[in-house]
Image (cartoon, helix red, strand yellow):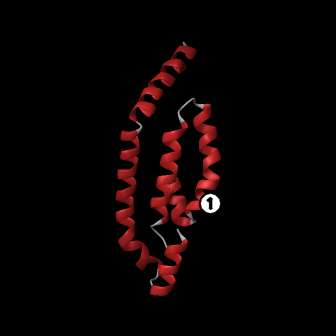
Amino acid sequence: VSFLSSALFMNDPTCLFLTPLVVQVVSARGLPLGPYLIALSTSANIGAAVTPVGSPQNMIIASKSGFSYLDFVAPIGPAAIFAWMINLGAVALWFRRELFGQAAAVAESTEAATA
């Protein structure tokens, strides 16, 4: 979500508005905040690189170069999508204990509560 939102708006408002939502949802499920907030911020930064409106630097580059919206997105879009996938894999690998160890504990407690 933050990848697409940052591509359409900017990464600062994306992080500002999505952080409270992520904190609420993740905390309610008893999951660790760190991996989800890191994924939010890094995905937002990668998404911001895709479009002319994603960051102030992109706006300057697009306006000074005369690139159309499509001229700007076409070469950067595929690379950014690839970078986003690598980012998700890196976050999952880096926080594997927190994510997968905690997820298993939450699943067990949910199963115990419903049994």
Left or right of residue 26: residue 99: left
Q: Which element is circle 1 on? A: helix
Q: Position of residue 17 (x, y in %)?
A: 64, 53
Say which residue appears at 39% left-offset and 35% top-offset. 96
Q: Is residue 53 above or below residue 38?
A: below
Say which residue appears at 60% left-offset and 34% top-offset. 27
Q: Nearer the viewer, residue 94 or 7?
A: 94
Residue 94, image quadrant: top left
- Most extreme residue toward the top is 115
Q: Which residue is under mark 1?
A: 13
Say which residue appears at 54% left-offset and 20% top-offset. 110
Q: Residues within 10 Å of mark 1 (few under 14, many from 20)?
A: few
Amino acid, disc 1: Pro
Q: Position of residue 105 (x, y in %)?
A: 48, 22
Q: Position of residue 19 (x, y in %)?
A: 61, 48
Left or right of residue 44: residue 21: right
Q: Is residue 81 above or below residue 89?
A: below
